[in-house]
Amino acid sequence: MDFDFIIRINRVVQKKNEIKMKSTQRKVSGAPLPTRMEGLLFDGKAFFLQQKRFFKDLMHPLSDLKPHSNFPDGILLSQSISLLRFNEETAQALVDGKIQNIRIAIKRLDGIVVRKGEVFSFWHQVGKPTKAKGYALGRELREGCIIPQIGGGICQLSNAIYDAALKAGLEIVERHTHSQVIKGSLAELNRDATVFWNYLDLRIKGSQDWQLQVEMNKNRLIVSIFGEEKNAKRDETQTRCAPAALGDCTQCGRTDCYLHTGDMPSPVRKTYLSIDEEWIEFAEWRKKNMQKEDKLISATQNASLDMQVINFFSKLKRRFYLWKGNQELKQAGKLSKKEGRSIYSWRKYPIPIAQNARFRMLAKHFAKKLELSDTYLIIPQQLLVWLYLEGELAGRDYDVLMSAMPMPEIERALDEAMKRYGFIVKDGYYEATNDENPCGENGVTLGDFRVSKDLIEAEKKALAGASRLISPHVKIQEWAGEKGAALDWILPEPAASLPKENSNFKLFLAGASLGRKGIFDLRAALRRLHFNFELLMPPSAIESKDFWKGINTRIVNSISEGVALCDAVVLPAVVEHNPRGLLLAIASHKPVIASAACGLPAYLNWKRADNAEELKPLLEEAFETANKSNNIV
């Protein structure tokens, strides 16, 4: 590093600081304001230094640092935590812009690994902040004033990196202090590092490999440094006082100053995101709580044309994944050519993977619709992980409309069910180890609903950052704890009554014939009954074609028809998040037997059964009740 070059830069910075101090004094005292000529002179000097830095870096190129998902044997060396909003008197729009600028820069910094002896350069890694890249107007200190500038406020990020580097004992190759101190910032402790493209840079290197991790929640910016061992801590803390008055071009009132911009108000509102899969409970809750100033971004039929197009193509993408899984299974001999809509077409690319392909596509387009002022979001759970991975939740407050348990909870419930039913993994499919639970041709669906560890970790962090988790589902509410916000299930209109076809006891399975819907327990209980019955099922996927062999079954045209024809409704599900069939049965005054996993509250009329042993007596009770009222034989 050419230290003479750094000294020359520091002299320019000192001169710049003097100009800014004089400017602030003139504004406060009412003296003549800075002129356009002074501004042009500053811009000219900055341009010269930017070109000089460019050619110097061209002659001595820096390494391109890449993010790594994990850092082997890395320990936390240091951490710097700073508030995103701290008693700033500048326009709220500039604060929102600052957070947006940090949000974009984080994407280029989080997870990068700097090898021993390599130099980390803030600007080389982040790149020039431009409007085309998504950077917005944020606050910048110039000539003693806070002014709007594209990329403004990004210094809070460089401050935090410098502070963490000092705590970790890393070598500071280049760093520059701010000309002015904003109250509440790290500059008050002399632990700041101003950056200005590209000649005022922050450069760091270490005597060991180290990793930079950066995250931002609704209130704080958190910078962490990981390495092999902690070096001696460098303490350069010095008290620097904030000036009694700091000019703010949005609020100073000096309209005769060429830097003056006037106030930049930012609306205070909530932003609701809506998709086709939205539950009626969430839609009604939104209608009740949404204020006039709030904003709705929708992907439904009433959405803007571009959102409707993206919504359509995202559904096509989901269908493609299902078709692709179907084709690969046919080639592998796991699916016959004649089989059409079979559950096996979902096994190579299960429903969650196909759905995620759609929601990821949707989330990217929703992200483009978000504005700086969208600081409080109401998010469908289907979009949560993908918005988090896009970095759009950083620095924002948000609630989540929960329509499912978290991924680890789903996997845990399915794993426990597999152990209980005695299944093992064979050739990538789950097969039974005993005659009590034959698995059919290709395995069982209890092995579905598995996702990568990266997605699980992303969901965990995204849910942890939410303010509220909103759902009518009782099990979800219990899991959410203090963050949970309970809604009531909305009962539909009762099913239309239909004439009874015969005197057999009719039991309706209010879900697909899949392992996660509790059909293994239901089949075991039905085989122990000593009266005539008929099992009605909706037109959906079946675990295997011979699964119900020996049991009198019939496929009805719809859930509403099944509820109308039956004497009782059953769903002993292992996983069930949207129990619409059960709600229809309750509204139609039909006896309901369900598991706790179905999420029904105690005040509704239903009975609980979580396994075959609990199912059998309740089924017999339902038969006796129907027998007394309908003369069933």
Image: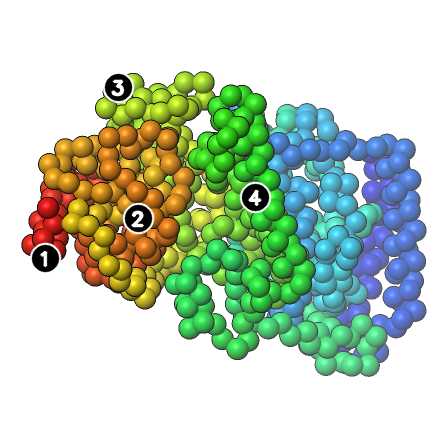
Contact between labelled residues 1 and 2, with CB atoms less than 8 Å apart: no
Residue where numbered disc 1 is placed: 629
Residue where numbered disc 3 is placed: 434
Sequence-first tag of 4 and 2: 4
Task: Give the image location of residue 573, x and y in percent.
Answer: 29, 42
Say which of marks 3 and 1 sits in front: 1
Say which of marks 4 and 2 sits in front: 2
Residue where numbered disc 2 is placed: 510
Sequence-first tag of 2 and 3: 3
Sequence-first tag of 3 and 1: 3
Contact between labelled residues 4 and 3, with CB atoms less than 8 Å apart: no
Sequence-first tag of 3 and 4: 4
In the image, is 182 to the left or to the right of 13? Answer: left
In the image, is 66 to the left or to the right of 397? Answer: right
| Label 4 neighbour load within 10 Å: few <14, some 14-19, many 20+ | many
| Label 2 neighbour load within 10 Å: few <14, some 14-19, many 20+ | many
Contact between labelled residues 3 and 2, with CB atoms less than 8 Å apart: no
Say which of marks 2 and 3 sits in front: 2
Residue where numbered disc 4 is placed: 318
State the image quarter where residue 589 is shown.
Answer: bottom left
Q: Amino acid at mark 1?
A: Ser
Q: Amino acid at mark 3?
A: Asn
Q: 488 and 310: which one is in front?
A: 310
156 to 526, vertically: above or below:
below
Q: Secondary structure at mark 4?
A: helix
Task: Give the image location of residue 137, x and y in percent.
Answer: 72, 63
In the image, is 180 to the left or to the right of 406? Answer: right
> Who's the residue at 28% across and 39% down the image?
553
Q: CA distance from mark 1 to mark 4?
A: 47 Å
